[in-house]
Amino acid sequence: MKNFIKILPIVLCSLLMAAHLGRANMFILQYISLLIPFFLFWKNKIAARTIQIFLIIYGFEWIRTIFHYAQIREASGESWLRLAIILGVVALLNFATALVFRTKSMKERYGLK
């Protein structure tokens, strides 16, 4: 149960990224994003590091998305500040979720030192 709370953000970040990729018609990447949480069942260092790498990539994708949509909004004369704040928080959530594997129980579960 204690690891469930730590695993939940990983699953939510992957699902959110899958929804984002599906909206962008990047279906192969969407399916990969949907498969990432299944690495949690594989209890070794490689699985943990793979998930961390994907979470960091997700964070950078959200930052790229901020710039993309901010340009579109600015060109149409709309405000983009709220968009940047919301997507910035999502990017930070992805980066912070990658740190879940630094907790004691997750280190023990995945054999990290």
Image: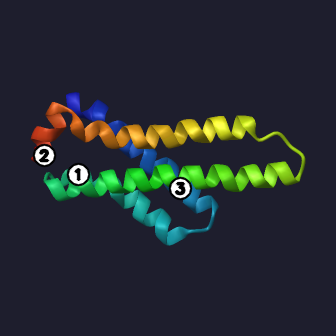
Give the side of residue 84 with respect to residue 102, left or right. Answer: right
Q: Earlier in the sequence, mark 1 or mark 2?
A: 1
What's the residue at 15%, 32% (across, down)? 104
Q: Where is residue 47 drawn, in percent x and y?
A: 22, 56
Q: Earlier in the sequence, mark 2 or mark 3?
A: 3
Alpha carbons under labels 1 and 2: distance apart = 8 Å
Give the side of residue 35 with respect to residue 4, left or right. Answer: right
Quarter of the image with the N terminus is top left
Badge 2 local density, few (<14 within 10 Å), some, or many (20+)?
Answer: some
Give the colour scheme shown. Answer: rainbow
Label 1: state its secondary structure: helix
Q: Which residue is mark 3?
A: 61
Q: Which residue is mark 2?
A: 112
Alpha carbons under labels 3 and 1: distance apart = 20 Å
Label 2: state its secondary structure: loop
Label 3: state its secondary structure: helix
Report the front residue among 66 and 44: 66
Whether residues under marks 1 and 2 lie with C-beta atoms below 8 angstroms apart, the answer is: yes
Q: Where is residue 94 drawn, in percent x and y?
A: 44, 43
Mark number for residue 88?
A: none
Kind of residue sitting beneath label 1: Ala
What's the residue at 82%, 39% (across, down)? 79
What's the residue at 55%, 35% (across, down)? 89
Kind of residue sitting beneath label 2: Leu
Q: Which residue is mark 1?
A: 48
Kind of residue sitting beneath label 3: Glu
The quadrant where residue 46 appears? bottom left
Alpha carbons under labels 2 and 3: distance apart = 26 Å
Q: Where is residue 90 drawn, in percent x and y?
A: 53, 40
Is residue 43 shown above or below 28?
above
